[in-house]
């Protein structure tokens, strides 16, 4: 039996079934029953294959969605940490600038004392 690919790995054998049914003279109900059983079997196989592929694709999508959620969580955590470190750096810079200003004032005062002592 020749099957042609119709996409997504699914084969189409309907044309051949129809040609077989149309071209073959049916002489008894037994032969017709055999054709019908073959047709029903092929339909069931095709449907089972389609449902299997759909299940596989749905499972793959669920896995990808889980990975995406995990990565989004990691990105959110990294952004939160970066913001915290940025805030801490800014606060440290401000504190250091205050200390530098204080030290500059002390140096100026000490220089004035040294000048008066000379």
Image (cartoon, grey):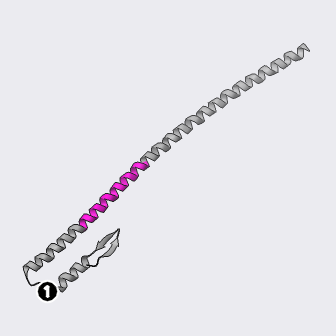
- Counting the numbered discs, the total is 1
Q: Does 99 sit above or below residue 85?
A: above
Is residue 113 rendered to the left or right of residue 14? right
For residue 100, which quarter of the picture? top right
Outermost right residue: 118
Q: Position of residue 71 (x, y in %)?
A: 46, 47
For residue 117, which quarter of the picture? top right
Outermost front residue: 1
Q: Which residues are magenta?
A: 46-68
The residue lying toward the viewer, choosing from 86 and 61, is 61
Outermost top residue: 117
Mark 1 element type: loop
Residue position marked by numbered label 1 in the rendering: 25
Q: Position of residue 98 (x, y in %)?
A: 70, 25
Q: Position of residue 84 (x, y in %)?
A: 55, 35
Residue 63 is a magenta residue: yes
Query: Residue at (77%, 22%) from the top-left corner?
Result: 105
Query: Residue at (78%, 20%) from the top-left corner?
Result: 106
Is residue 16 rendered to the left or right of residue 109? left
Q: Position of residue 24 (x, y in %)?
A: 16, 85
Main SS of the magenta segment?
Answer: helix
The residue lying toward the viewer, choosing from 44 and 94, is 44
Query: Residue at (8%, 78%) from the top-left corner?
Result: 30
Name the quadrant of the N terminus.
bottom left
Query: Residue at (84%, 19%) from the top-left corner?
Result: 111
Q: Does 88 sit above or below residue 63?
A: above
Residue 47 is a magenta residue: yes
Label 1, residues with CA under 10 Å away: few <14, some 14-19, many ≥20: few
Name the quadrant of the C terminus.
top right
For residue 107, which quarter of the picture? top right
Is residue 34 rendered to the left or right of residue 43? left
């Amino acid at each position: 039996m020749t099957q042609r690919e119709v996409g997504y790995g699914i084969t189409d054998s309907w044309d051949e079934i129809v040609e077989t049914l149309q071209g073959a003279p049916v002489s008894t109900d037994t032969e017709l029953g055999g054709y019908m059983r073959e047709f029903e079997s092929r339909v069931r196989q095709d449907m089972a294959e389609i449902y299997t592929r759909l299940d596989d694709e749905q499972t793959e999508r669920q896995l990808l969605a889980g990975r995406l959620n995990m990565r989004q969580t990691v990105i959110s955590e990294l952004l939160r940490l970066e913001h915290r470190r940025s805030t801490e750096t800014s606060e440290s810079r401000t504190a250091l600038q205050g200390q530098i200003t204080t030290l500059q004032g002390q140096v100026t005062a000490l220089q004035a004392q040294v000048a008066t002592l000379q």
